[in-house]
């Protein structure tokens, strides 16, 4: 909340880099696995520098780094540490989930700090398909370590409806059923600040389904919505506004490819300049939507 | 199928190690993150040696290794390589899942070989909550690289019912809805062998819900069921038998803690001996159930 107040806009830049799309200056044609992982780290650091003034939050996509093996995972964890060290709020987008004991291991490995030499993220995305006892170890770890969790409720991809869309006999969609579970589990954990009215257990709700988002907002008044799908994935203003509460709070709007690859459509010599400009545009756009 | 025929029993040992539970000879009281990751790798290699004669398949739990940071991930990937090199069929139990592009990255990073210096697993567990277009990149990667996928349908934990249990308006439970999607997507990929009748897209179905397993078996005749929950998690013979098809094929029964920690309840000097004995007991038990 403080970080959002500071920059004035609840936006997040998603760092989802792919080696082939990096600026030419960071790519070597003969790059091996370790070189590629290092190039991703260099690029990620450059993105952090470019966006840190404009946005309060970054989301770092584990899949892109895991693609390059354990060397990629090292780059991912070092980038998370660097982003934390710069004072950014960092969401690890790893979508982990498992049964109880394994969920504890994921919480320890993907959310917590390793120690002063390697800070963990502030929050982690998780997959809630395992149900309440698969989710609980994550919220417990978050509560004990002053961190946060975002459980997948409604994803931004077109095919998400296959599983999340069908109606339940008891009313509402499968996604709404998951939303109700998240709301219920969130109530058992403390709020993130005495006056925020918001829970440490948040929800991922795509910007691509405005009507679903409005219903989910009603079902989950205390959840912070992490909202992917703006920009490249086709989410529009209507879908974004539906994710905020009556105070125009409680949502973080994320754009990834439209920001980090902004240099592709320019002739700029310094690739970070268009990335910074696009991050500012994202901040100003969402800020204006909210009347700030 | 060939590996199962060779050892005579469709069983799998799950390698889910935790540093604190390793044999004392592998633990140092002052172990740091890297030391712990190396201890897990040593233990995992010892388990592979102990079980390789008795079982055709091992499942390696990513969460346990991720707990120890990128050093843990290196140990995990080296253990997968070693198990493959020994001729075991290896399932990477990483439960990955994301929207399309990120799912492609996970498929590349968690399923495919990195090259001759680091073989990837034979199969990967994934989370199907993202729906059909989140699942497709995994099956495509599997098809192109002669590998397999196991999508979570019905998990073995008690709380799994919260999300997977509710009835759909269109009939059946949420898990059955996911099962139907898996069956449909499996039909689009080739069978794993011309006469096997089995798809490269399998399903995770816990041994702890026998009635659900029987229904899911009917809905998914071509899916291989990866069946966790036997042993420590309380799954019994009834739950196991329900997972096989009419030919008593098409399921892989997994036990983890009951095998890898078998040394805890003995005075044996060599910790690998009780692990080997327990793996043989698992093989013989399931073989006898199937009348082999």
Image (tube, coloured by chain):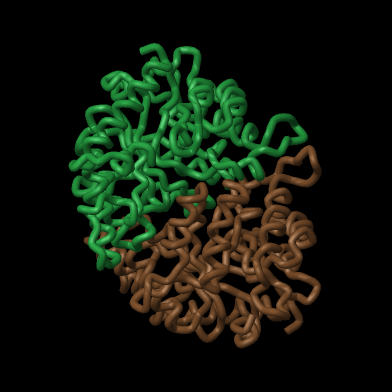
Chain colours: A green, B brown
Write the residue at 42% across / 29% down.
Answer: A253
Measuring 22% from the left and 61% from the top, which residue is drawn there? B30
Q: In the image shown, does B19 or A177 lie closer to the viewer? A: A177
Q: What residue appears at the point 71 percent right and 57 percent down from the top-left corner?
A: B184
Does residue A52 appear left or right of residue A129 in this picture?
Answer: left
In the rendered view, tell whether residue B28 sits above or below residue A210: below
Q: Quadrant of residue B68?
A: bottom left
Percent x, y of residue A106? 42, 51
Pick the front one: A52 or A263: A263
Query: Where does residue B203 sit, x and y in percent of width and height?
Result: 64, 61
Residue B148 figure quarter:
bottom right
Q: Is residue B185 left or right of residue B22?
A: right
Using the image as rendered, state which of residue B43 and residue B153 is in the foreground: B153
Quadrant assignment, res B73 = bottom left
Quadrant showing the C terminus of chain A: top left
- Image mark count: 0
How far across and how far down the image is residue B269, in percent? 39, 81
Q: Residue furthest front?
A: A267
Note whether residue B142 is visible.
yes
* Residue plotted at (74% across, 68% down): B241
Does any portion of residue B258 appear in the rendered image? no
Residue A185 vertical placement versus B148 (above, below): above
The correct choice, above or below, for B84 with respect to B211 in the image is below
- For the N terminus of chain A, the quadrant is top left
- Measured from the top left, where is residue B276 in percent x and y? 50, 81
């Amino acid at each position: 909340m403080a970080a959002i107040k500071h920059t004035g806009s609840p936006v997040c830049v998603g760092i989802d880099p792919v080696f082939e799309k990096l600026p030419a200056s960071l790519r070597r044609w003969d790059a091996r696995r370790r070189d590629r992982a290092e190039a991703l780290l260099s690029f990620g650091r450059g993105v952090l520098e470019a966006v840190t003034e404009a946005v309060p939050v970054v989301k770092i996509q584990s899949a892109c780094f895991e693609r390059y093996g354990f060397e990629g995972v090292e780059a991912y964890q070092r980038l998370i540490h660097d982003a934390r060290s710069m004072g950014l709020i960092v969401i690890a987008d790893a979508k982990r989930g498992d049964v109880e004991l394994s969920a504890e291991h994921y919480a320890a490995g993907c959310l917590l700090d390793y120690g002063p030499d390697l800070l963990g993220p502030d929050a982690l995305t998780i997959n809630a398909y395992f149900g309440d006892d698969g989710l609980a170890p994550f919220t417990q770890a978050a509560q004990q370590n002053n961190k946060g969790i975002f459980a997948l409720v409604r994803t931004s991809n077109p095919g998400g409806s296959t599983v999340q869309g069908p109606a339940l006999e008891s009313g509402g969609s499968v996604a709404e059923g998951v939303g109700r579970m998240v709301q219920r589990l969130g109530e058992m954990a403390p709020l993130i600040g005495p006056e925020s009215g918001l829970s440490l257990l948040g929800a991922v709700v795509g910007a691509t389904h405005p009507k679903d988002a409005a219903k989910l907002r009603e079902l989950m008044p205390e959840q912070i919505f992490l909202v992917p799908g703006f920009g490249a994935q086709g989410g529009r203003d209507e879908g974004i506004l539906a994710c905020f509460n009556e105070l125009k709070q409680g949502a973080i709007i994320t754009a990834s490819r439209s920001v980090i690859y902004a240099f592709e459509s320019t002739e700029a010599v310094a690739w970070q300049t268009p990335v910074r400009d696009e991050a500012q545009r994202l901040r100003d756009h969402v800020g204006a939507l909210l009347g700030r």
